[in-house]
Amino acid sequence: MTSHLSLLLHDTIALITILNPIAAASIMISLIGSEATSSTVRPIAFKTTLTLIIAGLVTLYSGEYIFKFFGINVMSIKVIGGILLMMIAINMASGNSSKSRHTPKEHEEAEESEDISIVPLGIPILFGPGVIATIIVLNNTAMKTLSLLDSYIIVSLSILLSSIATYFVLVNAIHINRILGVTGMKILTRIMGLVVGAIAAQFMVSGIKGLWG
């Protein structure tokens, strides 16, 4: 039971860090603009969270099989996932996390869109290629110590918990932006970038070892 809880905690923290809801909250407020109030933020946060849960569970239960269909080894996913996460981590550590999530053109289209909750906020700002690779790798890692059923349950709960945590951050985005300010947001993003970088390094080393073996 202790190993299950520790793995659940590890996976949840890893997903929250990679999702980076603090940066997403700042982007959401910038996309909404002057109309950002608690009443306008709440439904966007809810639909974005629902998008994360659905996309996460679909990735968990079908992602690895899709890759296997194309003959892609899980170790290869670890390597490319590690590279993607390292790119995100470098951007986060340099204070440019938003650049790794979406392009300026996508930002312009989002400002013109009436509903930003699914695209681009849910996908790809929060749920991007790095998260997809992370979910597959976390499940594959859990299978080494747990049964097939337990590993799916642990990662499913991690997706739910990280999505709920993201919801609370997005709902309180206005207050968080006011308290942290631009400087506080950049400092927190840089710290989270270091954690994402460490996870990325583990993914790459593990993947390279598996491919080499």
Image (cartoon, rainbow, N blue to C red):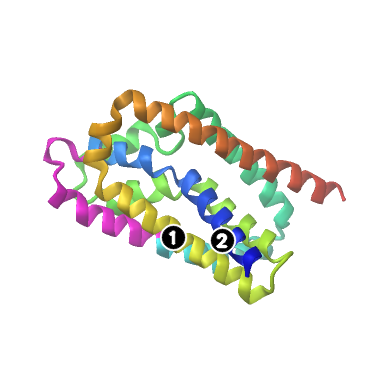
Residue 162 forms part of the magenta stretch: no
Q: Position of residue 186 (x, y in %)?
A: 39, 27
- Mainly helix, strand or loop, the magenta region? helix
Q: Quadrant of residue 65?
A: bottom right
Q: Return the mark for residue 161.
A: 1
Residue 32 forms part of the magenta stretch: yes
The amino acid type of the residue labelled 2 equals: Leu
Residue at the (33%, 47%) spot, across then down: 121
Depth check: 106 or 184 in front?
184
Q: Quadrant of residue 110?
A: top left
Q: Return the mark for residue 8.
A: 2
The amino acid type of the residue labelled 1 equals: Leu
Badge 2 marks a residue whose secondary structure is helix
| Mark 1 nearby-residue class (10 Å; few <14, some 14–19, many ≥20) | many
| Mark 2 nearby-residue class (10 Å; few <14, some 14–19, many ≥20) | many
Q: Quadrant of residue 97?
A: top left
* Image position of 46 with respect to 121: above or below: below
Question: Looking at the image, can residue 99 be seen?
Answer: no
Q: Position of residue 148 (x, y in %)?
A: 66, 74
Q: Return the mark for residue 151.
A: none
Residue at the (25%, 50%) spot, across then down: 171
Badge 1 marks a residue whose secondary structure is helix
Residue at the (63%, 37%) spot, across then down: 198
Q: Position of residue 20 (x, y in %)?
A: 43, 42
Question: Looking at the image, can residue 171 be seen?
Answer: yes
> How much space separates mark 2 and mark 1, taking CA atoms?
9 Å
The magenta region covers 31-52
Q: Is disc 2 in contact with disc 1, using a CB cutoff of under 8 Å?
A: yes
